[in-house]
Amino acid sequence: MLRFAVAVLVAVLSVAALADGQKTRADRVALPTIKIEQGDACVAPTSEMRRDHMKFLLHQRDRTVHQGLREPRHSLKNCVDCHASRESGSVLGKDGFCASCHAYASVSIDCFECHTPLRQRAATKAPK
Amino acid sequence: MSVDRRQFLAWGTVAAGAALAPGLRLIELAQARSPQEAASVLQRWGLLIDITKCTDCDRCVSACHEENGVSGHERPATDAQWIRTVGLRDTRTGHAQTLPLMCQHCEHPPCVDVCPTGASFKRDDGIVLVDKHICIGCRYCVMACPYGARSFVHEAVSGQKADVPRGKGTVEACTLCVHRVDRGEAPACVQTCNRDGGKAMAFGDLNDASTEIHRRLRSEPSRQLRADLALNTGVRYQGL
């Protein structure tokens, strides 16, 4: 009986410690800023965009460069136009839509070594 | 009422005439592809440059570099150059000429032959480009080009134009303003030369018999630079 009580106590304490540890870790890691400034809906559902946006961009880039197809649907220029921050006009920077999430996921992207991260279209009013 | 064949054909002719009445638009519409339509082998874009009208200005150079966001670091030896003016002087007579020189958009481009990754390529409509996504910056193409038309980007770039991505470690050259051509417009150098310069440059589809460039190439003498290399360049010169 005593042995069982000790086992339960140890289990409860370790679960509490684990939860506490997770909480501190969550506080330490800066969560990505997902602030969408323009437009009501993206070109695909959010879950699909989160998982596959890089595939869309890769596919589109080859179509554009090699075949001259400039479809707006998956063009990087249009991504930036919707997702650039209202203040800086950019998708990079600490709270930038692209930069903050990729920093969180520890993924280094090369897109903006060559492509401009700045919005080209004038920002419309914030959706209320 | 019965319609005989002759009458039917007559109506058809009238209808076709009515549809074609604003015929001036036809060429313009044919040039602007829809974004869903790929570049076609039926077209071949080219330039015709009349050196006799080429004055000593460098408006084509500045227009090109403005349009494509090509900015340097005040280091002429290494700064990128998409188009430049070349001075020619006959040593015996002293006769001097200036001509703009850029990628000649060859039918058989040596830069494409030597590229180890396939980054240098010729688009179906004859425009020779670098796919910077797969360019490794080896610069074989820079050495292979007989016109010295290609540049290597040595330093980090900022402030690029949205339609013209540029980055360190890749090779670049005149794209014939491919982003403008896809919109149905002429390259920036041609537009500026015809507006502010000597009206020396013409742009068009070398395969389309209805274009001015095709008509002039057919009826007037013109030259390719280094024609001995048999590259069949898309850029032709007159008065050289």
Image: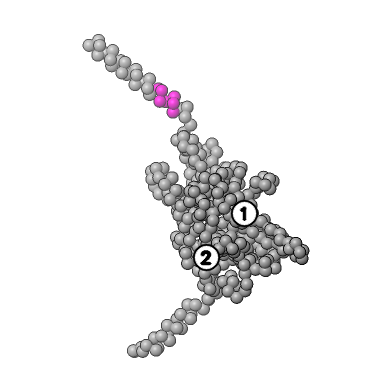
Q: Evaluate if marks 2 and 1 touch, with contact meaning CB atoms under 8 Å apart.
A: no
- Tell whether A88 sits left or right of B117: right
Magenta stretch holds residue A22: yes
- Tell whether B204 sits left or right of B192: left
Q: Nearer the viewer, residue B11 or A106?
A: A106
Mark 2 or 1 closer to N-term? 2
Per the rendering, the mark at residue B44 is 2
Q: Amino acid at mark 1?
A: Gly
- Residue, x 68% and y 48% (percent of image)? B76
- Residue, x 53% and y 44% (percent of image)? A112
Pinpoint the chain carrying mark 2.
B
The location of residue B42, given as percent across then percent down, is 47, 67
Q: Quadrant of the N terminus of chain A?
A: top left
Count of marks placed on residues: 2
Residue picked out by circle 1:
B148
Q: Which residues are magenta?
A: A20-26
Residue A113 in the image: above or below residue B66: above
Q: Amino acid at mark 2?
A: Arg
